[in-house]
Image: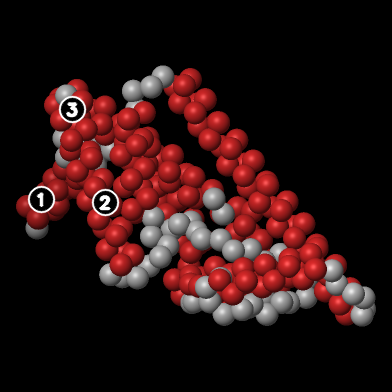
Amino acid sequence: MNDLSASRDGDAEHVATSPPMIAAEPDGAPRIAVLDILRGIAILGILFMNINDMGGSLYASFDDIRHFGWTTQDQIAWWLREVIANGTARCMLEMLFGAGMVILTDRAAELAGTRVVMKRYYARNLLLFAFGVVHILVLLWPGDILHTYGLAALIAFLFRGLRPRLLLTIGLSAAALQFAGGTYGYVSTTQTQAQVAAIESAQRAGRPVTAADRTLLTKVAEGLQDAPGPRPRMLRGSPPRTRRVRAAS
């Protein structure tokens, strides 16, 4: 009995004094826990953005999310998703992808040289691109983002040696252009919606409609016909209709 107790005490002491296991990269370098945690948060955010597409009709939500219902709870979930998660999780994952690329390639370049690292990194991301193509053509998921990451990595690698100030300038310039384009699209869409509402109001009132108005209505109708999925049913008190494609969003 004493021997058994002593054995247990020895095992407990060994467990208590054993160093904790630390996850490591294939080359033996320790993983950066903060980056892994942020990746997990970003993936959960992307799941939150796309779970309705995965659990229902993908094309229905492309054209109008209200196909899945528009109760008070649905509206709260929609606003929370749009304000908190839409674009945030995707941006976080993209930044982590870039950070991981720099850390991985810099460490490998010290051992094998930049040319060898470039060759291996390109082969790795071409394989990622191939997985994305299979995801789209075989598994029939049009929201795939793997092929986009694979192609983006081939370009981003060429910028890894630039100075931080230049990288920041390029990034802010691209963000400004995207913001300008998004603003123009939003204003244009809002103006078109207002024009269509005014024309429809005039039609209901029995006032004549000009040729320009009929042309506008025809263009809007043709745009709706080109949209995938069933036509949405307009609901009172609902947000403006938007067509968007979220990349693993």
Look at 71% across and 53% down and name the residue there.
Answer: 188
Q: Secondary structure at mark 1?
A: helix
Q: Position of residue 174 (x, y in %)?
A: 53, 35
**Rendered image: mark on residue 115:** 3
Q: Label 3 sits on what residue type?
A: Arg
Considering every residue shown, the one lying at the far left of the view is 3
Separation of residues labelled 1 and 2 (CA atoms):
51 Å
Q: Using the rendered image of the protein, determine whether residue 20 is visible from the camera's viewpoint.
A: no
In front: label 1 or label 3: 3
**Rendered image: mark on residue 7:** 1
Image quadrant of residue 243?
A: bottom right
Q: Is residue 188 above or below residue 232?
A: above
Q: Position of residue 43 (x, y in %)?
A: 42, 54
In front: label 1 or label 2: 2
Q: Secondary structure at mark 2?
A: helix
Q: Tell me the residue that label 2 is attached to.
A: 128
Look at 48% across and 77% down and name the residue there.
Answer: 56
